[in-house]
Amino acid sequence: MRRFLAIRIAQSLLAMLAISVIAFGMTHLSGSPVDSMLPEDAGPEEAAQLTRELGLDRPIHVQYFKFLGRVLSGNMGDSIMSPGASALGVVMDRMPATLLLGGFAIIVSTIIAIPIGVLTAVYRDTAFDAAGKIIALLGQAAPPFWLGIVLIWVFGVTLDWFPTSGRGGFSHFVLPAIAMGWFQVAALMRITRSSMLEVLDSEYIKLARVKGVPESRIIWVHALRNAAIAPLTYFGVIAGIILTGSVVIETVFVWPGAGQLAVEAIRARDFPVVQAVVLTFAAVFILANLLVDTLYAYVDPRIRYR
Amino acid sequence: MPLGDTILQVENLQTHIDTKMGLVKAVDGVSFSLRRGETLGIVGESGSGKSMTALSILRLVPRPAARIVGGRVMLNGEDLLSYDAERMRRVRGRAISMVLQDPQTSLNPVYSIGGQITEAIANQQRKLPRLELLKRAVAALKTVHVAAPEQRVRDYPHQLSGGMKQRVVAAIANSCEPQILIADEPTTALDATIQAQYLRLLKEIQQESGLSIIFITHDFGIVANMCDHVAVMYGGRVVEYGPVRAIFNSPAHPYTRALLSSVPAVDRTVDRLYSIPGQPPMLWDLPRGCRFAPRCEWADSRCHQEYPPTVPSLDAGQAAHTASCWKLEDIGLENVRC
């Protein structure tokens, strides 16, 4: 188990390093910033001088390691659109709102999706199973930005049950969490269902019945722990979908999170902030996957002892 | 060990399965009885209804496609088919337990084997403390000759060999000291040496506890080794039943005779092994008369029209040797090809 964890942590650090290369490379793809930073009447000597000052005349790998050193010390440059604030600071101010909404959406989707997925497998080919299929189909077919607008229109404007925008009490979470989570509910439900169907058909479930184990224990203890491996893997994917989805959902619901910040920063050509959002999202995504892999090893001893 | 009283009496058991091809009468009026300490072999090809008979006794037929539609399963004088679900659950593992075919997949991969052994015990005796359960698990592993059981209880199935897993399955089946053990081809997945060890182990357990065993197999070698009585199944019915000696020495039913002829013998050299002509019947489209008639060299028009009654075999000295065939007298008792 310790060996497994050590390997996975090393892999995560490597992935983080690769992402820093991409983030660094992307700013260089957009060309030299020197021309846009100089006044229009500046000559070639001034351009050469600024290039030297910014270190842009040094070899590319030297520039990368300087960048990496800055990132590791938490310095990602200053924000352009909010002068005086560090790019990372701006992002960190907004991250809690994003993580809270995303976390809420994931937890609620899980609480809804796993039991329904299990029960649709147990009661397969019944009306309950059919209803589950319809929920899943709708969730997977409706794009979140469209769903968000419809939810605002129906439950925010027409029925006036929930606030349509901003961050406040619990009621503010409901609509954006549904818009974000429905797709996850659908996906998780289907994965759980098919995984459960396979497990329920296995010999060891048959043996549990032969042993006289109560049916509820067979389903929720014997079968679910085995069937949990597939949906668990999917949580890593969900983390990515929720983070990228936050860009859309936070814009639709005017949610003051890092996703909305990313859109603002791109509009304002605030590259340090965009870079900080990308790196932070990447770190969260990699961390989430590390957590999933650890849980995975906890659930399945075959992974633990490899 | 002399055989005791009858503990299980299966009468006219019928189990039907709905399939895409139509209704399959997988178990079509099977009757037999089992006495204390007896080993009954159920022999037949794949699809003859052996496994479905076993699952029907435990009322674990795959639902909703399959259902038991008739008959009685009398355990110590009480009909299991009349039990409610909860009462039936308490019969499983305790009075009747079962060993499944494939040891590689019959243990739950995510729980320790100790946990899987104690679960069966804990099911029956709720109040046992953890330490006592663990002791019982170690004891159960000892009875099946697993080395270093104190360490093994903490292992997971993937850390054990195939033969070891099958022993653990036997330990689970035996953990609540059942009266009846149903073994559904428990050795097909094991190699010959391990198989022999395993069969010896089952016999040992039987001698210690007076267990009755229903042994489902298609291996006549195992039958000769293990069984007191044999029921030969074909097309969902028992076509011949009798003491193991009688079945081997004077098989009555043409199907039994054909099966025995197709067993290879070590003391003879043959160019080709005998094989029964034709195919096993399609279960959703069984012949009207004797199910074996289309493949039987003795069959006449009556065989194709009417199912034969179950009659005593010609070696009437052997009590309880019966067969379902119209042609017993024509066939006579002359030895089979083997």
Image (cartoon, rainbow, N blue to C red):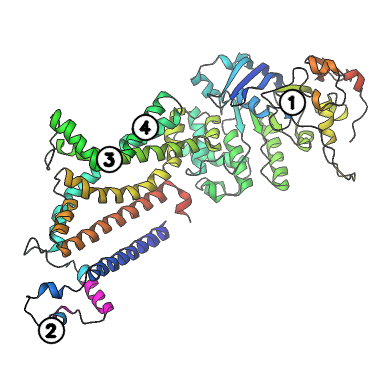
Tag 3: amino acid: Gly
**Is residue A68 within the magenta segment?**
yes
Residue placed under numbered mark 3 in the picture? A181
For badge 2, the amino acid type reads Pro
Segment colored magenta? A52-69
Question: x, y (%) of residue B262?
Answer: 83, 37
Q: Quadrant of residue B310?
A: top right
Label 3 neighbourhood size at 10 Å, few (<14), some (14-19), many (20+)? many
Badge 3 marks a residue whose secondary structure is helix
Residue A233 shows up from this direction: yes
- Pair 3/1: label in front: 3
Residue displayed at 31% across by 57% down:
A286
Between marks 3 and 2 in the image, the one whose residue lies nearer the viewer: 2
Q: Is residue B210 visible?
A: no
Q: CA distance from mark 3 to mark 1?
A: 55 Å
> What residue sits right under mark 2 in the picture?
A44
Tell me: A257 left or right of B152.
left
Q: Is residue B321 above or below residue B112?
A: above
Query: Circle 4 — which element?
Result: helix
- Residue A175 horizontal/vertical position (percent): 19, 37
Residue A117: percent from the left, percent from the top?
Answer: 39, 34
Sequence order check, earlier mark of 3 and 2? 2
Whether pointer 3 and pointer 2 mark residues with C-beta atoms closer than 8 Å, the reply is no
Asked whether the residues under marks 4 and 3 belong to the same chain, the reply is: yes
| Dot 2 or dot 4, earlier in sequence | 2
**Mark sitting on residue A116:** 4
Q: Residue at x 63, y 41 (%)?
A: B144
- Crowd class of label 1 (few under 14; some 14 to 19; many from 20; radius 10 Å): many
